[in-house]
Amino acid sequence: MRKSQENQIVTGKRKRAIARARLKSGEGKILINGKHSFEEYFGNREALKQRLLKPLEMTGDIDKLDLFVNLQGGGKVGQADAFTAALAKALASHKESNRKVLKAAGMLTRDSRIKESKKYGRKKARKRFQFSKR
């Protein structure tokens, strides 16, 4: 890995969650927000764990790289999807051969669905206050 790519910070987003990831050569350690391990942060959710580690398994780098991720905003599932997007982007920039594999699996496409913002004069984005004729 070249020096410029090692300190490169890649961003992934999903809903209101933002993940910033940095890859480093190592033994497969994942550190979230500077202090939490992977299992400690996301708990014992096996489906989330499989979703999160899918880009690493596809490229075969699961025990060759250390991953440092900063997560903020949203809920756990949104953060997990942002984490996956950031990891896929980081792996694609790490090695050019990874890009084709991740692109074919649809990992490099941003999921642009976000919450619609609230409008004034309404209860939520589209819901109106109750109408009373009399």
Image (cartoon, rainbow, N blue to C red):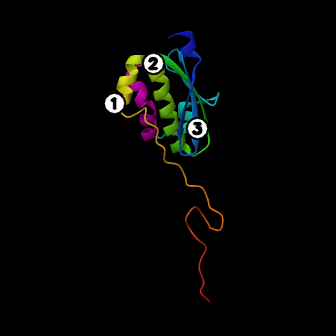
Q: Residues within 10 Å of mark 3 (few under 14, many from 20)?
A: many
Question: Outermost residue, bottom direction?
Answer: 134
Closer mark to the observer between disc 2 and disc 1: 1
Q: Give the range drawn in magenta.
A: 46-62
Q: Is residue 102 magenta?
A: no
Indicate the quadrant where residue 104 lies. top left
Q: Real-space Cα distance between discs 2 and 1?
A: 23 Å
Where residue 131 sits: x, y (%)? 59, 80
Residue assigned mark 3:
18
Q: Type of residue at label 2?
A: Asp
Residue assigned mark 2:
63
Indicate the quadrant where residue 33 lies. top right
Q: What element carries label 2?
A: loop
Above or below, comparing residue 95 to residue 83 in the picture: above
Indicate the quadrant where residue 122 lies. bottom right
Q: Type of residue at label 3?
A: Ile
Q: Is mark 3 on a helix, strand or loop?
A: strand
Residue in the image at 59% along x and 77% along y? 130
Q: Which mark is residue 104?
A: 1
Q: What element carries label 1?
A: helix
Q: Residues within 10 Å of mark 2 (few under 14, many from 20)?
A: few
Quarter the C terminus occupies: bottom right
* Mark 2 or mark 3, earlier in chain: 3
Characterize the magenta stretch by its predominant secondary structure.
helix
Q: Does the magenta stretch include residue 56?
A: yes
Closer mark to the observer between disc 2 and disc 3: 3
Residue in the image at 42% along x and 19% along y? 61
Above or below, comparing residue 59 to residue 122 in the picture: above
Q: Do the residues labelled 2 and 1 touch (CB within 8 Å)?
A: no
Query: Is 66 in front, or is 11?
Result: 11
